[in-house]
Amino acid sequence: MKKVEVLIEQALTTPSKPKGCGCGCGCGGKKKNSPILKESKVKDLLSEGMSYHIDKKVPLFECEYRIGSEAHLSLIREARKLYSRGIIEVSEMDARLLETDLGHFGDYEGEPVPLDLPMLNEAELEEAEYQGKEVQLNKPKRGGSKAYYVYVKDPKTKKVKKVSFGSGGLKAKISNKEARKNFASRHNCKDKKDRTTPGYWSCRLPHYAKQLGLGANQNTFW
């Protein structure tokens, strides 16, 4: 562990080279979608997963591991640490991913729960009752008073609540990087933590794209 700390300290104190990223990848210092190692000294200390993403030029948001698995969460934690210390360079989308709490756990009713994890790997779609009928929690669907709705359990009252969210025209924009960026910035998506509010679900709509017929799931905010 001491060796790791020493190498990281060296990486942070060694002046950057004026040209290129110093990683030997031939990128010429230009930003790519995949993580770029800025300091080759620590390459041998990277996990197998991180090395794969760097060598194969695979973005973190296209993780090869099953989303929500320990390997996936461990990779995100490792990437966040390397990124915060300036050891790797990441794309704008990966940076937004690392700004979330993905990989960390919180406490809910005495049980550890993963934070900011896409719903399809959360809570196994727990069933509950709402106004006399059985419903699935945390599973967005089309329809309702707005474009979509979802049933959630209020952690304070323990009651099931129906949350309506979204508006028309989202399907055309969900794959538009600039639209997602503007939406996330305008609505402060990184600060939306309360799943009983429309804003929480609107910001995470790309997580549920496939089940809503909006294309492939994307592990990112709008």
Image (cartoon, helix red, strand yellow):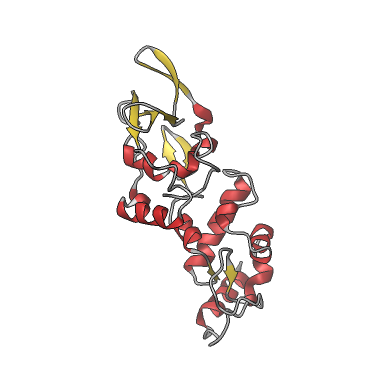
Instruction: Between residue 64 and residue 215, name the one nearer to us.
Output: 215
Depicted 222 relative to depicted 109: above or below: below
Locate residue 211 relative to residue 57 in the image: left or right.
left
Image spot of residue 198 (x, y percent) = 32, 37
Q: Residue at x 35, y 52 (%)?
A: 183
Can residue 73 be seen from the camera position used here?
yes
Q: Position of residue 153 (x, y in %)?
A: 37, 28
Q: Is residue 89 above or below residue 196?
A: below
> Residue at (44%, 42%) from the top-left corner?
171
Is 182 left, or right, of 80 in this rendering? left
Looking at the picture, does residue 56 appear above or below residue 220? Answer: below
Give the x, y percent position of residue 149: 38, 30
Residue 118 shows up from this direction: no
Q: Residue furthest bottom?
A: 18
**At 55% from the left edge and 61% from the top edge, which residue is drawn?**
79
The quadrant in which the N terminus is found is bottom right
Q: Which of 128/179 is in front? A: 179
Residue located farthest toward the top when viewing the structure as drawn: 132
* In the image: residue 181, left or right of residue 3: left
- Name the foreground residue: 79 vs 21: 21
Where residue 192 appears, as percent x and y from the top left, is 34, 46
